């Protein structure tokens, strides 16, 4: 059994280091936490920095307010796609009031793996945004979709509430502490990689295109 195998391996390691000059039970020196932890920007500058860093990663970013989320989303997903194109997939738990009334949308629960591979894109929310790194963090709760939903489609549209955006990485980890044992997905722009000749290739590890709607109020 996996648990028994793990215990056997740890027991073997403890036996091997028994009597070693290194004591793993002793107190380690305190970790220096003099690095920047809290942000210093006001709310608008923090949001502007978040948008700037996302755009540096080639993400498409728009600002809107809560009353116009549907309009902002409609401009991206469209309302009259080709019948040959699998519709946009919407993560379960995303408010239906945000969605345009269109046949171009398919709820995640009804989407197969083939649908995710062939769909026009996926619409999700997130848990947090990090301004300094232009990163979106998802813990895959309601509205955020399963991990496969954010990794398989070619296009990802993420709706971020302004209250979810923090300036620094330590601030984000404080928010994420309750989800420390859950699988988290960190997204810093569209998926891209480069080979030894520095040829940039998109879509290797996730969506090639990232759209972000930042809801300011």
Image (cartoon, grey):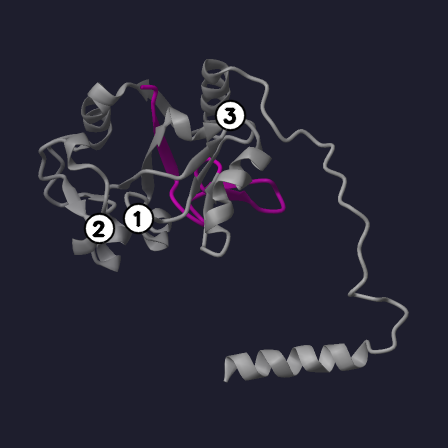
Whole-Å distance between the Cαs marked 3 and 1?
24 Å
Q: Disc number at residue 120?
A: none
- Which residues make up the magenta segment? 188-217
Q: Residues within 10 Å of mark 1 (few under 14, many from 20)?
A: many
Is there a contact, CB below 8 Å, between mark 2 and mark 1?
Answer: yes
User: Residue lying furthest right in this view?
Assistant: 21
Circle 3 residue:
53
Q: Disc number at residue 108?
A: 2
Could you say whether the residue bearing mark 2 is in a helix, strand or loop? helix
- The answer to whether residue 144 is above or below residue 3 is above
Could you say whether the residue bearing mark 3 is in a helix, strand or loop? helix
Q: Residues within 10 Å of mark 2 (few under 14, many from 20)?
A: many
Q: Earlier in the sequence, mark 3 or mark 1?
A: 3
Magenta run includes residue 195: yes
Q: Earlier in the sequence, mark 2 or mark 1?
A: 2
Position in image of residue 148 (x %, y %): 34, 54
- The answer to whether residue 184 is above or below residue 36 is below
Discs 3/1, front: 1
Please identify the quarter of the rendering in which residue 198 is found: top right
Residue depicted at 83% across the width and 78% down the height: 18
Position in image of residue 105 (x %, y %): 15, 41
Does residue 86 show up? no
Please identify the quarter of the rendering in which residue 90 is found: top left
Q: As rendered, which of 122 and 38 lies closer to the eye?
A: 38
Circle 1 residue:
145
Is there a contact, CB below 8 Å, between mark 2 and mark 3?
Answer: no
Answer left or right for 159 relative to 50: left
Whole-Å distance between the Cαs marked 2 and 1?
7 Å
């Amino acid at each position: 059994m996996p648990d028994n195998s793990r215990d056997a391996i740890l027991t073997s390691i403890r036996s091997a280091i028994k009597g070693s000059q290194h004591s793993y039970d002793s107190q380690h020196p305190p970790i220096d936490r003099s690095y920047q932890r809290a942000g210093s920007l006001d709310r608008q500058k923090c949001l502007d920095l978040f948008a700037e860093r996302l755009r540096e990663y080639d993400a498409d970013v728009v600002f809107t307010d809560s009353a116009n989320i549907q309009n902002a989303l409609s401009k991206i997903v469209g309302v009259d796609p080709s019948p040959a194109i699998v519709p946009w997939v919407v993560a379960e738990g995303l408010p239906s009031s945000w969605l345009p009334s269109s046949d171009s949308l398919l709820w995640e629960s009804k989407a197969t793996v083939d649908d995710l591979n062939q769909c026009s894109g996926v619409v999700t929310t997130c848990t947090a945004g990090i301004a300094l790194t232009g990163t979106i963090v998802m813990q895959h709760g309601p509205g955020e979709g399963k991990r496969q939903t954010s990794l398989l489609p070619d296009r990802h549209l993420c709706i971020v509430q302004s209250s979810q955006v923090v300036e620094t990485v330590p601030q984000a980890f404080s928010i994420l502490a309750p989800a420390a044992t859950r699988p988290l997905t960190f997204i810093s722009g569209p998926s891209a990689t480069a080979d030894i000749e520095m040829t940039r290739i998109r879509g290797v590890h996730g969506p090639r295109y990232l759209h972000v709607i930042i809801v300011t109020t």
